[in-house]
């Protein structure tokens, strides 16, 4: 099947359909992106929270060379032979790609794509935490900026947080910056290890909103199973998972859970477009969600991705380029490398 037909098929499965005019508009952008990627030896790495048109991969006629969670994108970034990585995600993720691939040019289609967690803590805050808790190892969630990572012992993503924490002998660990994720991890550790987590007061402005909306949907759909990201408040986890089947975990855990479950209906407590990802993968299952979008992720669009590719080799290129100072890059590389070795 030609690329454009494949794309429409996958995109329609994810979104429930597309008008002919909208399809023609998207296809003209995709065609130019394909040409520019080949011309500049560029790849597109795209997070699961991107709009659906950026989540269709090249096997399905789209333009994303790889679609994944934050860990998957970090690993994939190290494998590519491309000269340019166009990062369709948020800034801390693009910075991670720079730290792992200093010889490549990493472009972010909009530098406004931040993250409430990354913005909640600085390197100076970590130094204070270390002073208050001497000798306690610091685990930095990947959702932090490079200058924060530079002061930490190891990084983790939602997918490998449990494994990374367990790899430390120390009973006490500092986990920054997501307090809800930390509380959910601490609950899990209570039953499995003697670990005690010292937390920071950061929250994800998207996942912290999954509260009574999820509980009401859960009550209204008695057969549905529950899918919650680690970053959702602990009260929501208790109010739903104490009564129903489901999972609190990483994006990868959520995808694996759906793959293995026989249920036909799920309530999703994570970013709205992960619902589109799931719908595209499992068209015969239903995903009910309050549809809360990450405004930072939504700064990135197909059109801005095209504009980014058009800028390569022009005076505009630097507007998109993500740079991390060498001194910070070298120090932030240590905890990221340690994470990749442990995961
Ligand atoms: P993942 O590590 O699951 O990709 O999550 C990243 C994120 O930003 C969650 O809000
Ligand atoms: Fe950050 Fe939350 Fe957006 Fe993820 S969903 S990028 S944690 S603000």
Image: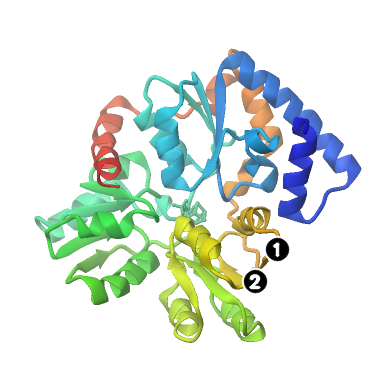
Whole-percent x and y of residue 272? Answer: 63, 59
On screen, residue 181 versus residue 128, left or right, reads right
Location of the N terminus by quadrant is top right
Report the residue at 12% width, 58% height from top: 169
Report the residue at 67% width, 58% height from top: 279
Color theme of the render: rainbow
The numbered mark at residue 151 is: none
On screen, residue 131 versus residue 294, left or right, reads left
Report the residue at 46% width, 29% height from top: 322
Contact between marks 1 and 2 (CB within 8 A): the answer is yes
Name the residue beneath numbered marker 1.
284
Whole-percent x and y of residue 323? Answer: 42, 28
Q: In the rendered picture of this protein, how many numbered marks are placed on residues?
A: 2
On screen, residue 88 versus residue 197, left or right, reads right
Q: Earlier in the sequence, mark 1 or mark 2?
A: 2
Neighbor class of circle 1 (other Cα within 10 Å; few <14, some 14-19, many 20+) is few
Name the residue beneath numbered marker 2.
264
């Amino acid at each position: 099947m030609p690329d454009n037909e494949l794309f429409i098929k996958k995109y329609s499965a994810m979104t429930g359909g597309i008008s002919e005019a909208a399809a023609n508009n998207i296809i003209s952008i995709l065609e130019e992106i394909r040409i520019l990627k080949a011309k500049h030896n560029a790849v597109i790495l795209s997070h699961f929270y991107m709009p659906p048109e950026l989540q269709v991969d090249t096997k399905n006629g789209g333009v994303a060379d790889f679609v994944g969670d934050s860990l998957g994108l970090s690993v994939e970034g190290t494998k590519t032979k491309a000269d340019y990585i166009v990062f369709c995600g948020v800034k801390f993720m693009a910075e991670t790609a720079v730290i792992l691939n200093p010889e490549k040019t990493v472009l972010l289609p909009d530098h406004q794509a931040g993250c409430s967690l990354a913005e909640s803590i600085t390197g100076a805050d970590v130094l204070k935490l270390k002073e208050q808790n001497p000798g306690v190892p610091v685990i930095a969630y990947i959702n932090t900026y490079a200058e924060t990572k530079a002061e930490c012992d190891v990084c983790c993503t939602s997918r490998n947080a449990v494994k990374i924490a367990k790899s430390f002998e120390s009973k006490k660990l500092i986990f920054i910056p997501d307090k809800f994720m930390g509380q959910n991890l601490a609950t899990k550790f209570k039953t499995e290890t003697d670990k005690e987590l010292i937390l920071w007061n950061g929250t994800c402005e998207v996942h912290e909103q999954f509260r009574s909306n999820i509980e009401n949907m859960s009550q209204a759909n008695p057969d549905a199973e529950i899918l919650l990201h680690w970053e959702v408040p602990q009260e929501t986890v208790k109010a739903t998972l104490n009564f129903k089947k489901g999972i609190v975990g990483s994006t990868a855990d959520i995808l694996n859970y759906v793959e293995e479950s026989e249920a036909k209906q799920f309530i999703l407590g994570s970013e709205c477009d992960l619902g589109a990802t799931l719908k595209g993968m499992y068209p015969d299952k239903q995903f009910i969600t309050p549809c809360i979008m990450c405004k930072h992720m939504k700064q990135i669009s197909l059109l801005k991705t095209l504009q980014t590719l058009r800028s390569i080799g022009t005076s505009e290129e630097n507007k998109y380029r993500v740079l991390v100072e060498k001194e910070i890059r070298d120090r932030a590389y240590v905890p990221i490398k340690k994470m990749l070795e442990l995961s």
